[in-house]
Amino acid sequence: MRPSLPVLATILATLAGWLIAAPASAQTAPIPMRIGVIPVIGASPIFVANGEGWLKEAGLAPSFTTFESGPNMIQALASGTIDVYVAGVAPLAVARTKNIDVRVVAATAVEEMVFVAGPKLAPYFADGADKAEAFAQFKAKEGRSARLATQPLGSVPNTTLQHWLWQVAKADKANAEVVPMGIDATQQAMLAGAVDGASIREPALTIVQGRNPGIKLIATGAEMFPDQPGTVVAVYGAYADRNPAAVEALVRSLILANDMLKTDPARAATHVLAALGKGIIDAATMQKAITSPAAKFTVDPRAIVAATRAMQAYQVSIGALEKDVPLDGLFDSRYYEKAIAR
């Protein structure tokens, strides 16, 4: 599906202005940009920017490597294997305490994690029932606490789930058991009925609800942890210092991609599908995933600074972090500010 004429005109006009200011020219060799990425919906802007060819048009030569976790990607940054990190913000502040100079230049998504309940647990939340009472009634009837899947302690999914359970829903800890497991395992456990609920993100939300309509969305990301920081784009400091124009071009392309995700999700979905689908889901399902309540895209890195600090403080309170890690120097909004000023 092609964008409407007004949308296309807007995109092309923006792109034209961007290309005029691009760091490369016909006489300049493309600037290599090695990008590490975790394949989740939150990384959609980078997939759209690459799929539309905007990175190459700006004089960049992008290459992609897929990782399973942020910590593994941090090691790749430190070893000089990649230049750009597209994953969760949580490991980055810790990396800086280990003298790894990495700087967040853009956000991509916030409030990615949501809570879903399986067919046994979901009815207890019907008609706006009190959340703590729902867990209590489930235990009274089933004779056990609700088993809730999420990722390991210290991760954003685990942190947001615990925050929602104990601070928002104010559930009794005797009525809910947090079960750590991998991302894929969480999705499979929900579909198999091995757990009663889970904190998940897109496209898992769309997939599990499509396969089992009895799985219900109980809490959005905003309800679980307002402005919860999700996927970000960070650049290795030495690379940014050598190639400031390339980093600015990257951020401008993410702004264009963010606009397309909101104004023409059908077209954007084709690029996300190419990166994530791998024959597992179709284009319609992917479009539904990027327009769902669990897909909230933003590029402004300034929008997540306060929430990152708040989440870190909560992680300390639950023992996921030993102490607060200074955020000084982690966020570098100069590239974003230059991009939007053009």
Image (spheres, rainbow, N blue to C red):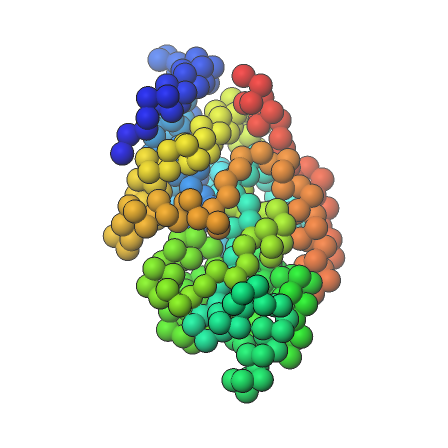
- Counting from the top left corner in percent of width and height, residue 296 is at 50, 43
- Counting from the top left corner in percent of width and height, residue 150 is at 52, 65
114, 96: nearer the viewer: 114
81, 143: nearer the viewer: 143
- Counting from the top left corner in percent of width and height, residue 23 is at 46, 18
Q: In the image, is 270 to the left or to the right of 323?
A: left
Can the viewer see residue 66 in this picture?
A: no
96, 228: nearer the viewer: 228
Q: Is residue 30 above or below residue 120?
A: above
Q: Is residue 327 above or below residue 238?
A: below
Q: Residue at x 29, y 53 (%)?
A: 281
Q: Residue at x 66, y 41 (%)?
A: 305
- Counting from the top left corner in percent of width and height, residue 190 is at 42, 69
The image quadrant where one finds the C terminus is top right
Q: Which residue ends up furthest to the front in the rendered image? A: 127
Can the viewer see residue 333 in this picture?
A: yes
161, 172: nearer the viewer: 172
Q: Residue at x 69, y 63 (%)?
A: 167
Q: In the image, is 170 to the left or to the right of 237?
A: right
Q: Is residue 116 above or below residue 302?
A: below
